[in-house]
Amino acid sequence: MSLRVTIASLTLRHPIMLASGILGTTPSMLIKAYKSGASAVVTKSLTINPRNGNPNPVIVELRYGLLNAIGLANPGVENYLAECLEVKDDLSRIPIVFSIAGTKIEEYVEIARLISERGLGRALELNLSCPHVQETRLFTEDPKLAAQVVKSVCDVTSLPVFVKVGLSTNLIDVVNAVVKHGASAITAINSVRAMVIDINAKKPVLSSVYGGLSGPAIKPIALRVIYELYENFSIPLIGVGGITKWQDVVEFLMAGASAVQVGTAVYKRGFRVFKELVRGLQRYMEKEGLKDVRDLVGLAH
């Protein structure tokens, strides 16, 4: 039985990756996630300068998911790369995808250039859709802007460029634009802009008012987006949004994803999630008599 999948130039041992924003704050955590069973790991989104993010509270646990408004807190790309170089030998054996974010096209380009020069990553994932950072979210609302940033990044790197999109009214137009300008894969979807109100305090819970909803509540939406993108594009798709059990993995593959990313489930249940999902996927394939996991991709169409 083969669980191997290929996304652009990345060949993964199975389709289940660590999503950005969860545990990717340090290189050592990425290594631990891979050793615990993830097939590839995505860093927390890196910006050109260090960011403190939003003041607390920035996370609310809900019975149907997680609401966060971290605000892209990170040490900045140069500091993060310096940490990576300290464990370069270990990282070189891991499919690591660098998530990058910015407020201007020039920032995405500079970050991509720095990462590519260090030779540490296997791919880049452009976060064009952070729901709680207005400047970043604008990229996924405008097809022309999205196309410009993808083309500009592709001009300075030989790494595959994944584009992480969120919900927008013109999603098909945005994806069409980035595919035409060099995207190697589409990651869908980002967390969904949402909020919670404290009825005793009579005000929003999050300091930033709005945050990004992830977890089981958004799974049907993410699944619909992957299904719709598969109907319209031949580019590899990476599904993310509310994957907590192996049945969710199978659904996303059948909708058209070649791989999936897991975030909230890792936050809530720890590293054991990866092996649980892989074992469930294997048992399902055995029951169905499937020899290659790629035979599941798009099967529901």
Image (spheres, rainbow, N blue to C red):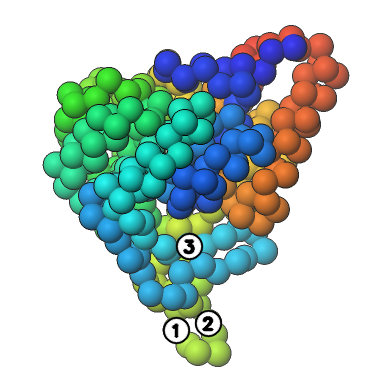
Label 3: state its secondary structure: strand
In the displayed structure, would residue 118 be above or below residue 13?
below
Amino acid beneath label 1: Lys
Can you give x and y, in whole percent of width and height, for residue 66 in the image? 57, 60
Amino acid beneath label 3: Asn
The image quadrant where one finds the N terminus is: top right
Instruction: Give me the C-alpha separation between circle 1 and circle 3.
Output: 16 Å
Q: Which residue is at a point 25% across and 44% down the rendered structure image? A: 139
Which residue was labeled with disc 3? Answer: 68
In the displayed structure, would residue 245 be above or below residue 199?
above
Q: Which sits in the foreground, 185 or 299?
A: 185
The image quadrant where one finds the C terminus is: top right
Label 2: state its secondary structure: strand
Which residue was labeled with disc 2? Answer: 198
Can you give x and y, in whole percent of width and height, for residue 83 in the image? 39, 47
Q: Which residue is at a point 51% across and 33% down the rendered structure image? A: 90
Instruction: Name the N-terminal-most of marks 1 and 2.
Output: 2
Instruction: Give me the C-alpha separation between circle 1 and circle 2.
Output: 6 Å
Which residue was labeled with disc 1? Answer: 203
Q: Which residue is at a point 85% across and 19% down the rendered structure image? A: 287
